[in-house]
Amino acid sequence: MNIGRRRARRPDDWPSSHVRARSDLSDRLDFSLEPDEAAWLETHLGACPDCRSIEAAYAAQRLELRALRDRTPAPPRDLWARTSAAIDAESRFRDRRGRSSGTRPRRAFAPPAILATALVVAVAVGLLTSSQWFPGDGGAGSSAQIALGTAPASIASNLVAPAATEIPVTQKIAYLAKDQSGDFTIKTKYVDKVCPSSSSQPCNDVNPTVDRKITLDQAAATVFGSPDDARLIVINDPKSPNSGTISVVPLGSEPPPPSPTESPTVAASIAPSELPTAPPTATATATAGSTPSLQPASPPPTASPEPSDTASPAPSVAITPTPNGAIEIANDVVLVGQSAAYASSGDWFAFTARPVDESTGPDIFVWHVGAARANRVTNDHRSIFGSWVGELIVGSTLVDSVASDPSAPADLVPTSFVLDPATDVFTAVPQAGRAWRPAVDPTGRRAVYWAGSVRRLSSSGFVPGAGRLVLGDWGVDPSPSGSPIATSAAANQGTARHETTIAAGQINDWDARWDSTGTHIAIWIADPHNPSIGLLNLYAVNSFDGKIDLKAPLLKDAPAVAGYSISSGQLVWAEPPTDGAASGRIQLLAWTDEGVGTVGTVTGPVIVIR
Amino acid sequence: MVGALDTRIGISRGFGGRAAMSGSWEHDAAAGFVEELFAAHHGEIYGYLVRMLRDPELAADLTQDAFIKAYRNYNVLEKPENARAWLYQIAHRVALDHIRRQKIIRFLPWTGESHGSAPSTERLVMDAHLSGDLQRALARIPERQRAALLLAELHDLTGLELAAALGVSHVAARALLTRARESLRQALAAERKAEADAETAADAASTAGRDGQSGTAR
């Protein structure tokens, strides 16, 4: 087997000569070692009986594994019939979807991708308000500088990488540009090289962009792109006259939006006044499925995420497709937090929102591709979407605790849950301890979360209280047995969950996102005085123990506007404006087997994007 | 398989470059593409999923799921020659998604209703059919390592194909394979030791029983 060459490791790279020998023995099964390495191995084997036994074990293991080929079970005879029928059903569903809105689909057909590129295009999360980003729309650029306190350091100083020459990459970014007349253009740029920190010259990408005009609401401020590039989800600036609207804008051959006259009553409401409220005495038990009660260590909880069925379907919300084919999937809401995201399949999009009028706190909403409206899937007004694991939502809610001084406002205790949007089955996970807004890695093993209490900021908002932003164990013990972790909040959570403190102190907001492989984690922490900007760090995750080395970030404290994107091998963010400039640059950091590098790609009034 | 693949490659690409084609044509092309893929590879994909999950019925369901995903995303594949690795990649992700979902559900010890916690009849049959210390050892190692070993040793995926199927770089795939071999070696050793201990205990019990019977006879 030709697997390719790893970077040649120096002898002192290895923890021991035996580890080196084991690696060589494994490699040697697949290809010839370099002559020097082969000679070293033979010498080592000559002096190491244990290593010789390992060599024999690997060889025997291979023979035993290959012997299993003769015992391959035969697939069921009706497998093609089942598969073919399922494909036909999907095709019919898709055809129907083009004609009517239908009810909220279950695992509905997702339109084929428009891009054939192998690049993962986790799209743009541009959380820039137009007043902060576009000149003439409020001119808040200078406020960003003031709030940040210091001028952004150069990328080279933020980037921690040892390489010395340009690093070839094959990455792609896309962003929204707004011209002086207010028209938007999707610009796509292919980047073929990045520069390591040691580069003496500024590294700017000069490749041309592929442009495509798009009609968007002038108030568009936050943009999420679907993994298949089939659509944008556009959220308007909450300060604009058209605030509170979340729209889906199809790109390419997206089927037409549902007709407002065909099935308006199936639309899910997100208007708070149209939804039932949580029972005042409800516990933190979610009962949509075979769900147990959630029992915090102390006092009975008072909040309860309710299943979506209590919130939908809602009566008569008009569906209003616009001339550009956009449909409004939510109205009169404000996005809460930074964690909105598509599921990796691209079939679902989840976000947290609260009513514009702040009449209630945040709840989690889910939109399925093809659906007319987003569904509110919690109803306790204190739930926040954390992340996806596969097609399951991981979220958190808050329960009341008893203060020692009854007259003092009590902190709230976070607790997490898992929700299947396809079935509405809700599952509490108190074993996670005090974990607020967990961003779980794609393997479900580790998560970034707030380990501590939460304070009520107002009638509709919450901020971290006492505690720390940590990286800790999530669902499953990484040991081969895969046994569940049975840590409770009562135990020493920090030790039991192997928590690494990322930040502590006054933290009002953050955005933690994993790359698609779970090998890198980017963490943006908002400036306490201006939540639209903050500092961005990127860490490689140790594949053996799931930990990060805080002292060796791949990107350190890079000033960044809220809303970045991370996908396979790349991180894209926008610098805040500096020195009176209308806007900063969009930066791309890419990592490959050859190193880590970055490149500045564009300046001007743009909404971030990847 | 070539026909549909060649047709599919003709689809224009790029951001916003989705092919302008009717839904029926698209369905026909995708369905034809998947049918050819299925004919060529469904047996090995099913075999891979059976070994990953040790549940034939579940493996059949997920094989079906994998081909449906291939149908949905048929125009993502750029090179027909990569179709096999691409299909394995889909199957691998489907399997891991299922395993992760089960782990999250298993994370709830008090419910007693963990989906899949009770082995199905088919799984018991499969365990009997494929029993042995090797199968048990394979089940003990982390699933990504298990996947790497199965794909490399049983399904003959080459280096770049293996990396593509696992969704990692070729260097990472190679490192994963190294760790997998070591994990399996240790797991096999543990299995065989446990087996030997059990046999020793059984022999001792049997001997004691015979001695007891002899004593009674005397």
Image (cartoon, rainbow, N blue to C red):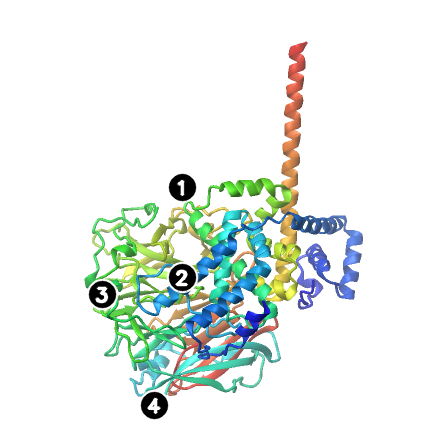
Vertical position of residue A280 compared to residue A339: above or below: above
| Mark 4 in CB contact with mark 1 (< 8 angstroms) | no
Q: Position of residue A435 (x, y in %)?
A: 38, 55
**Label 4 crowd (10 A; few <14 / some 14-19 / many >=20):** few
Task: Give the residue at mark 2.
Answer: A387
Label 3: chain?
A
Task: Give the residue at mark 4.
Answer: A180
Q: CA distance from mark 4 to mark 3?
A: 34 Å
Label 2: chain?
A
Q: Which amino acid, mark 4? A: Gln
Q: Of the numbered discs in the image, which one, if any, rests on residue A271?
A: 3
Task: Give the residue at mark 1.
Answer: B112
- Both on one chain, marks 4 and 2? yes
| Mark 4 in CB contact with mark 2 (< 8 angstroms) | no
Q: Position of residue A351 (x, y in %)?
A: 34, 65
Vertical position of residue A139 compared to residue A482: above or below: below
Q: Which amino acid, mark 1? A: Gly
Q: CA distance from mark 4 to mark 2?
A: 36 Å
**Label 1 crowd (10 A; few <14 / some 14-19 / many >=20):** few
Q: CA distance from mark 3 to mark 1?
A: 37 Å
Which structural element holds mark 2?
Answer: strand
Q: CA distance from mark 4 to mark 1?
A: 61 Å
| Mark 2 in CB contact with mark 1 (< 8 angstroms) | no
Q: Nearer the viewer, residue A197 or B155?
A: B155
Q: CA distance from mark 2 to mark 1?
A: 26 Å
Q: Earlier in the sequence, mark 4 or mark 3?
A: 4
Which structural element holds mark 3?
Answer: loop
Which structural element holds mark 4?
Answer: loop
Q: CA distance from mark 3 to mark 2?
A: 24 Å
Q: Nearer the viewer, residue A387 or A159?
A: A387
